[in-house]
Amino acid sequence: MKFISSKILSFIFIIMLVCLSKELHAQGVEIRVDTIFTSSSRTIKIVTVRSIPKFILEFNASYNIGALELSAHNGGFSADDFMNGKSYCARNGFGFNLTGKLPLGKKGNFWLDIISGFTKFQSDLVAKNDSDGTVHYNNFNGGIGAEYNFTPYHKVSYYTGLNVLFSFISGKAENLKQPNVFRIAGNRIDVKINSSFRIGYTLFAGMAYAFDKNFGVNMGLRFTHANLLLKKMEQPTNENTVTGLNDYPSNPDNHVIYSGWKQFAYASAYLGFSYFFGVKETKYKLP
């Protein structure tokens, strides 16, 4: 009896050892360490370098504010000031300009400018006090000059320059109130201002932004003195209804109507677009 019990106990002990060994083996299979290898990445930097344009064509529109004798007064047109030659009696205007630019050298700092434009001033553009009448002036102009570009190879370029300006200035005063001392039939007349040739200058500073190698925008400020040279006094004709620009004073003892020392000067803020010709792009890979 004791012999059988010991055999049974031995058999149970062997079964327990087998089961325990299997469980330990199974747990050992679940423990695993994996190593993941990833490929390393590299950033490549490309730099694009543009050459200076072989030619630049610019178009812009401007809003103009008169200065000196072109500044008029806050109330608008004054018949007395206009007839006595004290003022052009127009303060506000607008204009358009077309400019071609050629580089003077390989570095692109100095440029030759060829300009053309149109400017219009009128007394009732902003001020509406027209009880004495209204006046407007047209200035067709062109010129040549030079500019200096501080950053010719950059996307944003800054420049300043000076152009000699040749102007043909004409105009008309309408519904002009006339006092009896001028012995003109009727109380209101129209006065034609014949086209007058003058020489002046334009001083400017601006910037251009290139969207790509062909197209960009430009903006800046200008000061123009259109009648610096060739001022002239003319005797009006046709019962004082036709005159010249009359920007030179007459003898105080024998004053000529509409004549006086007057400057056709104004400041402008302009904005427009630019087109670049002949720009080449070169790409470089940085180390």
Image (cartoon, rainbow, N blue to C red):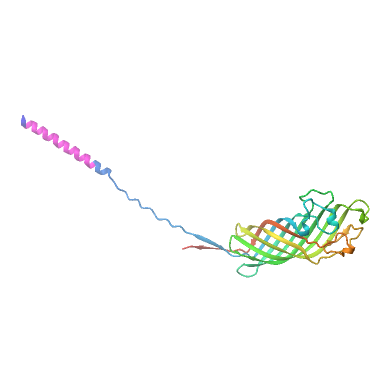
Q: Position of residue 102 (x, y in %)?
A: 66, 66
Furthest toward the bottom, the residue is 105
Horizontal and vertical percent for residue 224? 73, 61
Residue located farthest toward the top when viewing the structure as drawn: 1
- Write down the quadrant of residue 92 in the picture: bottom right
Task: Please say if 142 is above or below 23.
Answer: below
Left or right: 68 as drawn, with respect to 17: right
Q: How many marks?
A: 0
Q: Position of residue 133 (x, y in %)?
A: 84, 51
Nearer to me, 99 or 2? 99
| Magenta stretch encompasses residue 183 | no
Q: Position of residue 82 (x, y in %)?
A: 84, 56
Is 16 in the magenta? yes
Specify the principal SS of the magenta part: helix
- Judged left or right of residue 135, residue 15 is left
Residue in the picture at 17% in, 38% down: 18
Residue 52: name its quadrant.
Answer: bottom right
Rendered image quadrant of residue 217: bottom right
- Residue at (87%, 56%) from the top-left corner? 191
Query: Front-most of 8 and 73?
Result: 73
Q: Quadrant of the N terminus?
A: top left
180 relative to 250, above or below: above
- Residue shown at 78% from the left, 58% from the top: 70
Point out the stretch of residues depicted in magenta.
3-25
What is the residue that sits farthest to the front in this orientation?
A: 253
